[in-house]
Image (cartoon, rainbow, N blue to C red):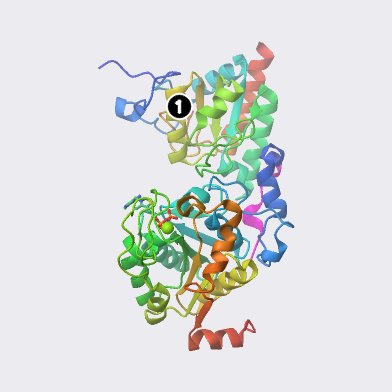
Amino acid sequence: MPQYKVLPGPEGYLPPPAALMGVELPEEGKALVEGETVSESDAVQKIARKILAAKNPTIFPGPLVLWAWSETACKKAQLVRELAAEAGMKIIPMPDYRPKYPMINPAVEINPNHPNLTIWHNKIDVCVFIGVHCHYANVALKIIRGGTDCYTIALCGEYGHEDAMITLRDVTVAKLEALLAVVRETKRKL
Amino acid sequence: MSKRITEMCPALNDAMPTEYRELVENGPWLGDKTVKDLGTFKELLEEHPLCAGCNLALSLKIILSSLPNPADTIIVGSTGCSSLGFMQVGIHNIHSLFGNQNAVATGVKRVLSMRFPDKKKDVVVMAGDGATADIGLDMTIHSWFRGEKITTIMFDNELYANTGGQESGMTPAGRVAYMAPLGKKFPKINLFEIAKTSGCHYAVLLTTANTVRLGACVKKAILLARDVGPTYVQIHTPCPTNLKIPPEESIKVAKDSEKERYAFNEYVSEAAKSFLENTGNKK
Ligand SMILES: Cc1ncc(C[n+]2csc(CCOP(=O)(O)OP(=O)(O)O)c2C)c(N)n1
Ligand SMILES: [Mg+2]
């Protein structure tokens, strides 16, 4: 079977989970780009280029960085802010996961149960997930791949997200700082 | 109690939707709110998709404004019309399988008391009459038999509203509904009496018509569940859609029922009475 590529959609209603298609999570120190294992620094470079080249890049901070659980959460939030400013990204929060019904306001928030609404409404071509708990990130990434052509990037604090087009794992404050530095550097070179 | 769980990371504060910021800045977290304060703070439920004139939605708003400790309250709901409202409630809530709510609440309560032994965490079940008295009756009563320290609140619209109007055990005898055209053949279940004899330390029968009293009784039920034992609140919430009541008259229908099957009735066990006396919470 040819290697399954995790590419922008729309892949159609119910796209397969990348894991079912044979994509494995990256080992420690590695990352995934479109389903393939690469070195973390390659992935970081690629992320910087992707967001800087995007028309309408947007970062979606989730509950783990929005709410003041800890000092680390607040530090990460600060870095999200700086990253967004540096890369010209819009910030649209995912404050919680309740399946708000009948609808959220897609101009100001994103909800994991219908993330496509926010992508469509704001015409987002590249998005970055950070601080979203694993199970909801997986659901949302899959829905986005299913229904939109948005390029998804997951900055994951745990083991990474095979359903995103690019994923880093174990994203700590230091790794975010490093990503920010690479974005700065790449921008300077452009 | 701390307001800290509702704080946001300063760096992203201004990216949050206004609704969340208002909840943080002016939510009901200190728990000293009552129905009379409605309008002076950001409510836990504002927009909801329930029908115009829905008494269930009204009682939910009143209950949420009367929680003694909203920041440390977990609501366990069940399938039915109320579950549509919970999606918009800004507080921890769990949707459980239809009928399982008191079993789920038991687990949540027990684990919370192990995990946070020196914190007061209130577990409150809120479910329809079908969930509480029909499919979940086993779970409801057994949680009372076991003396679980949880509050059970029943939204009694006297039928299965969410599925289009089937009769429930709580439907009064003779009532005809959309999907029960022959009329109910046996009387309404008296769950209030059952609660009294099954281990509840507090049980109350009331309607949405007296909002202040409803708020006060909910508060009392939750405080008693925290320290004494199971408590039960049964609220008559007539359904305008299924009973063809014009929305503006739906509270009147609730009020009228106070003259017959929903006359205010409050049971307080001896243990609960002495607890209330000792804590100066008599009223
Ligand atoms: C296990 C299970 N059985 C049956 C149903 C179908 N069902 C959904 S809502 C409902 C009735 C709800 O009635 P009630 O608890 O009185 O709530 P209401 O809608 O009247 O507020 C039923 C039977 C279900 N969802 N799950
Ligand atoms: Mg009902």
- Compare residues B7 and B229 and report the one nearer the observer: B229
| Quadrant location, the N terminus of chain B | bottom right
Does the stretch in magenta take in B7? yes
The chain carrying label 1 is A
Q: Residue at x 54, y 28 (%)?
A: A117
Residue range corresponding to the magenta coloring: B1-10
Q: Main secondary structure of the magenta part?
A: loop
Identify which amino acid the numbered label 1 is placed on: Ala
- The residue sitting at 59% across, 69% down in the picture is B214
Q: Is residue A64 left or right of residue A23?
A: right
> Residue A86's image quarter?
top right
* Quarter of the render that holds ligand 2: bottom left
Is residue B146 at all visible to an observer of this figure?
A: no
Residue A178 at x, y percent in the picture: 60, 29
Residue with the mark numbered 1? A164
Measured along the vertical axis of the image, is residue B85 above or below residue B133? Answer: above
The front one of B247 and A185 is B247
Task: In the rendered view, tell whether residue A88 sits above or below residue B178.
Answer: above
Q: Say whether residue A82 is left or right of residue B147.
A: right
Q: Is residue B78 visible?
A: yes
